Image (cartoon, rainbow, N blue to C red):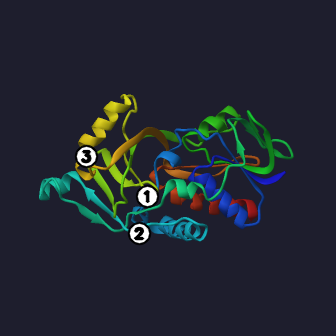
Amino acid sequence: MYDLSIVGAGYWGISMALMAEEAGMSVCIIDSKNSHSGSRNAGGHFSLEWFSGEFREHMELALEDAERLGFKVDRSGAKINTISERNKNGKGSFKEKPDWWTFNPSETLSLRGIDVVGEVDGISGKNKRAIVCTDEDDVWSRNIVVCAGAWTDHILTNSGYPGVGVSALRGSAVSFKGEHREKVLLHQTTPYRQVSLRNWGEGRIRVGETTETGTKPTSTYVDKMLKTVGHWLGPDDVPVRCYTGFRAMRKSPFAGMVGDKVYAATGGGRNGGLMGFWAARKILGELCG
């Protein structure tokens, strides 16, 4: 029997596992390897300037935890091509954002492997031991943390627990074979739509947005992205694939108990990669006293 079962191997699940194991707990990560994971397909950039007050202090501690446990943060910064910047200084003008930092999603998610691959059928903490039932195996532990991103409420409510009010924000992207870029580039097309170009691992770059419906044919979507930010791409930058992911959105992030032996952590949106360590500190503090 494990000390802790973690449902979800995205940023929040990985962070929870790394922190729990550092504290001496035995951990089992369960994940379905869903191809629409927000962590696998999006995220990976953040700024401490997005936070203030006491929560800023929490996030500074989270960054310390992340780097201590293997997150490699690129502090090169970003350049933003906003509507207001273009109106004032012309189409090609950018605003420097030295506080926007990034990390590589695939490299980060590989810091801790998945122990059980399977769809979660249900969870329960109502007996002496907590159980996660999957289509592959049942996992017994002393406590469960559901870190399933946009799917967190689905798992909780299907198992008879209250949801935490998380919703899904769809985002789509195109990855290209391409050379490393010095900084993240962001192009604001409307007040509510932004397209970013950033490094996405060795020899790859990613062009993506957070409000695309994902209903267009692949070729149409690639053409759309090329039309929007094609001037940032070189002649050797070749499209590789299109994909869609869902960010877990909530007015404020949640990390806490939802039932006996059952906890949930979700709702970080684009801040999930770093905020998972805040959630781990909060929940492990409750578990360990």
**In the visual, does 40 lie left or right of 22?**
left
**In the visual, does 149 lie left or right of 125?**
left
Residue 173 visible in the shown view: no
| Tag shown at residue 45 | 1
* Kind of residue indicated by mark 3: Gly
* Kind of residue indicated by mark 2: Arg
Q: Which residue is drawn at 63% across and 63% down?
A: 281
Task: Report the residue marked by disc 3.
Answer: 230
Residue 162, picture quadrant: top right
Q: Which residue is drawn at 41% across and 69% down?
A: 75
Residue 283, picture quadrant: bottom right
Mark 2 or mark 1, earlier in chain:
1
Q: How crowded is mark 2: few (under 14 residues within 10 Å), some or many (20 or more)?
A: some
**In the visual, does 17 lie left or right of 169?**
right
Q: Number of numbered discs present?
A: 3
* Kind of residue indicated by mark 1: His
Considering every residue shown, the one lying at the far right of the view is 128
Task: Report the residue marked by disc 2.
Answer: 75
Mark 3 or mark 2, earlier in chain:
2
Along the line of sight, the residue nearer the viewer: 201 or 52: 201
Q: Position of residue 196 (x, y in %)?
A: 34, 51
Helix, strand or loop at label 2? It is loop
Q: Compared to 146, does 215 lie above or below? A: above
Q: How far apart are marks 3 and 1 (CA)?
A: 22 Å
**In the visual, does 169 lie left or right of 7?**
left
Q: Distance between the residues labelled 2 and 1?
A: 10 Å
Query: Which tag is nearer the camera, tag 3 or tag 1?
Result: 3
Mark 3 or mark 1, earlier in chain:
1
Q: Distance between the residues labelled 3 and 2?
A: 25 Å
Q: Position of residue 105 (x, y in %)?
A: 51, 54
Along the line of sight, the residue nearer the viewer: 198 or 277: 198
Helix, strand or loop at label 3? It is helix
